[in-house]
Image (cartoon, rainbow, N blue to C red):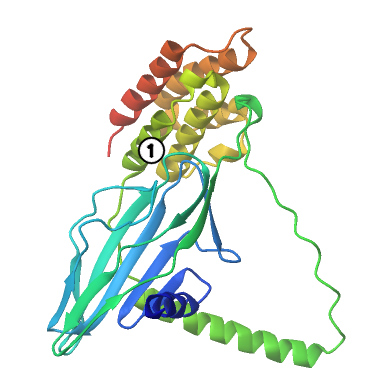
Amino acid sequence: MMQWATLLTAFLIGQGDGTFRDGPVVLRIRPEPDRGVISLPAPDELTITIRVEGSDKLEVTPPSKWIASRPWHAHPPAPAKIEKVGAGRIAWLQTLQAYPPVPGEFDLTLAPIVWKDGDNQGQAKFAPIAIRSFSTIEKADLRNLRDPVWIESLPPEPRRRPWLNIALTGLGVSVGLFLALRGMRRRPKGPKHSPEERALRALDRIDGWRLPEQGKGERYFALLSLVVRRYLERKHQLPARHRTSRDLLDLLANRDDLVAEREFLAHFAEQADRAKFAATPSSSEECRAAQQSVRAWLQSRPL
């Protein structure tokens, strides 16, 4: 009974922005939950940041396995960082990258975090967090591959109280700026991963789903294309996911520094089109060859 009370307390301390607290331990999860559920588009990963702040005598004992629930996978984390936050005070920081092996609905449960600060000691526990991993791509039409668009309903017409609206707006902006600046100062810095590393890890995840062996060659090529487009956005700030394949190639042709990329991307788009319009599904060998070509292309990119 005491254990469930602790879990419930830790869960209720959440601020609604993906931040949860238990004593000196602060857990931050990205992307943020919406109505208690985190939506994670495949093949993205979940970023978990753990921060423990205390005196310079603070000690944190990491668990042997950070994630206690299945079927989650986690990359080996970088060593924890120790930062000075004031006179005689430090902060212990740890960042994790985790993902489910396949799309679906899962609960994420972290192992308890043991800490000791002088004569004080404790064990932080957090309630399971609901995760929904999904893919928005059903068909691999690279000529019309775009992100989904949600249209919000219009807000109701405000009442005619201009001075009150101006005062409330000013107050809201002031509070928002204060909280934003405060969050920027306290936000822990996690390890940075290059666009190439993130794309290669996404390829590993897609490869583990074994879609070609299930006769889902079109979906496999669509996910490969999504990895390539996200890489172009992160590396070169191109709106790749919001352009058709032809528009994207024309955009690359107008960039002198990216002309060399056009040859590979044109060839890859042609492969994906064949996968869509072929009378028979793409074979496992064709899918693997395409994945290896994308992997070799990413590995050849300058860091």
Q: Residue at x 34, y 35 (%)?
A: 200
Q: Is residue 174 above or below residue 295?
A: below
Q: Is residue 228 above or below residue 168?
A: above
Residue 2: where, in percent of width, then height? 38, 80
Asked which quadrant contains residue 163, the reply is bottom right
Residue 289: where, in percent of width, then height? 39, 15
Q: Residue at x 39, y 31 (%)?
A: 208
Residue 25: where, in percent of width, then height? 31, 77
Give the residue type at disc 1: Ala
Q: Is residue 164 above or below residue 224?
A: below
Q: Badge 1 is on which residue? A: 199
Residue closest to the eye, 160 or 64: 64
Asked which quadrant contains residue 244, the reply is top right
Secondary element under disc 1, as helix, strand or loop, is helix
Residue 300: where, in percent of width, then height? 28, 28
Q: Residue at x 44, y 26 (%)?
A: 210
